[in-house]
Image (cartoon, helix red, strand yellow):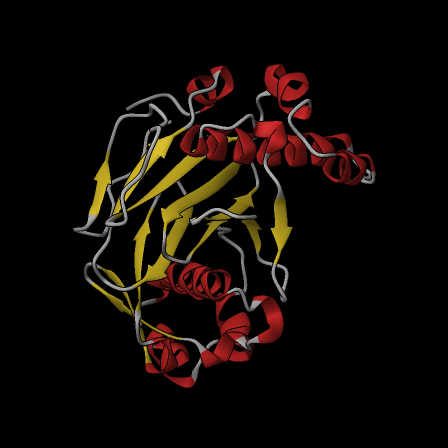
Amino acid sequence: MATQATNSSSCRLVSSAIPRSTYKAAVDVYCSDLQDAASIERLAAMLSDDERSRATQFRFERDRRSYILRHGRLRETLASYLGAPPERLRLVSGPHGKPFVEGEEIKFSLSHSRSLMLLAVAHGREVGCDIEHRHSDFPCNEVAEHFFSRSEARALNSLPAAQQAEAFFKTWTCKEAYLKARGYGLALPLDSVDIALTPNGGRLSGACAGWSVQVFEPALRYHAAVVAQGNDWHLNVRSLPTPALAASHPAS
């Protein structure tokens, strides 16, 4: 997959090899294709009984496969950090549904949109990520009126029409990533999170003090954001290599 140029000066493109350890100054983020049918059986064997049961409840086969790929790769990646078998990891949820590995300091966040998934991994600091596919006909201004803060909506409306869709999805992914990092889910209204887009990406303000955000484009027409505690971290953008990934996103 060709990773697009990032807007963040603190974002680094690194080897796709999965590390055995991570450092507190780094947040690793992995982009992966969700069309890798060849890995379904292998990854399904890593899931817990509850995850396997959940997978059977999807009405459409494509959604079942996507779920298995996301959660299997999550376990596989976390296991590479912890040195434990993927199927032995105990994933539990916090008060608002944010998952974590029981008894471990490692933190993670998982997101997906269409055929891509995003996984952020950090050590000793909370982290959240979001990925969205940019739709050319998405009603950006209408949605912004309901879910953006007043300053965000004004900033969006002040832009030329040709730039508004990109600005909308950058802002949206930052907001979603922040909510996931805090573990609030939908318990915190989206318009209570204030994002200011900058030439280098985005800036959290107001009640979001103590957190920082990095934005990047993992593929054409995809926007992604990662939020973590503090401002003393850098982002390592990685990819989980699969045969389907190389075929559907050739390097440019």
| Residue 37 x, y percent position in the rendering | 63, 19
In this rendering, the answer to whether 207 lies above or below 138 is: below
**Quarter placement of the N terminus:** top left
View extreme (front): residue: 103
**Quarter placement of the C terminus:** top left
| Residue 75 x, y percent position in the rendering | 55, 33
- Camera-side residue of 178 and 141: 178
**Can the viewer see residue 133 in this picture?**
no
Q: Residue at x 36, y 57 (%)?
A: 125
In this rendering, the answer to whether 183 lies above or below 45 is: below
| Residue 13 x, y percent position in the rendering | 24, 35
Q: Residue at x 52, y 46 (%)?
A: 110
| Residue 156 x, y percent position in the rendering | 37, 73
Q: Residue at x 21, y 40 (%)?
A: 12
Place residue 210 in its image quadrant. Answer: bottom left
View extreme (bottom): residue: 150
